[in-house]
Image (cartoon, rainbow, N blue to C red):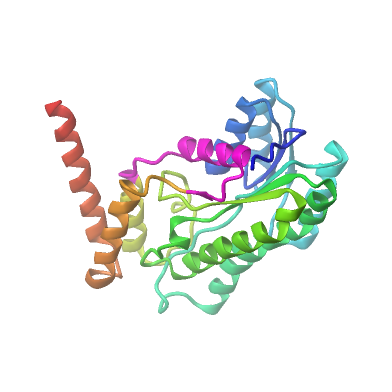
Amino acid sequence: MKLIPKGNRVLITGGASGFGKAMALKFAQQGWRIYIADIDVQQAKKTTLELTAQGVEAHWVKCDISQPDDIQTMYDAVMASWQGLDVLINNAGIYSGGTINEVDEATWLKVIDVNLVGTFRCCHKFVPLFQKQKTGRIVNIASLSGILPTPGSIHYAATKAAIVNLSQSLRHELRLYKVGVTVAAPNIFPTGIFSNGMIPNGSIKQSLETVMSYSDVTADSVANSVFNAVMNDEFLVSTDLDTDIGWFLKALDKAYTTSIETLAFIAKSFDKKSQTKRKRKERQ
């Protein structure tokens, strides 16, 4: 059943740059009012100015989702501006790479606190509002790693798997209130996630960035899928399971038995796949 939001108001955490910004631009193109919540104040201001220049209403608020007080400040700011909300997109998060031998407990807890607990904090704050309104959407941004763990991303993958499960549980809980829940679990695509992430193993970082460079998926295409899922009450947003993800699953399966440490052979596989596609296009 379609549950079309009534007021066209969307809040995006981590919306100042990267995939969050791509979603903000997509919703803005459809005439939605945008609220950017981000820890990077300067970038949040810049993105908000870009949005207002397009003729849409846009606001920003500083928010670190690992800080409960910031979550409250974000909530208060949204309510002061709009007295309600239609779509909450929990996009803010951090990436940290490493095998279990490379990840200390402090890093493990930090990634869980930001990615998983931070998502919970935002949901916990806004769910009562959605229940009272009897309308709304929650979109939680996970990753393909939440369905099929990527070697060298053990703690990041664990948080994304938990977000998938959290989203499914919320969808069941909120159905009676006519509140939809969507989880996005896209394949890897170009963003600044790895360059800004905590990755102690240089070979893992280099291989992940190489894999990303060969991805056919874009932030804009995933943002478009998220928007459509919001409008049509779809649960899972992913990329093409029959092509890129299907291939990626096979590559990862080999990774577990070949080289869990570096992912180098995956990068080579992407390169081989890319060359094959280019040659095919040249023949056409």
Q: Quadrant of residue 260?
A: bottom left
- Residue 218 among those drawn in magenta: yes
- Residue 20 among those drawn in magenta: no
| Predominant secondary structure, magenta span | helix
Is residue 230 something that shows in the picture? yes
Horizontally, residue 17 falls left or right of residue 71, namely: left
> 4 and 10: which one is in front?
4
First to last magenta residue range = 213-237
Residue 235: x and y, percent?
Answer: 56, 51
Q: Residue at x 54, y 78 (%)?
A: 105
Is residue 66 something that shows in the picture? no
> 172 and 57: which one is in front?
172
Determine whether 262 is above or below 275 in the image: below
Q: Quadrant of the N terminus?
A: top right
Residue 274: x and y, percent?
Answer: 22, 42
Horizontally, residue 134 falls left or right of residue 179, namely: right
Q: Residue at x 54, y 73 (%)?
A: 108
Marks counted in the figure total 0
Q: Residue at x 53, y 42 (%)?
A: 19
Determine whether 254 is above or below 58 in the image: below
Q: Residue at x 69, y 30 (%)?
A: 32
Q: Quadrant of the C terminus?
A: top left
Determine whether 186 is above or below 250 in the image: above
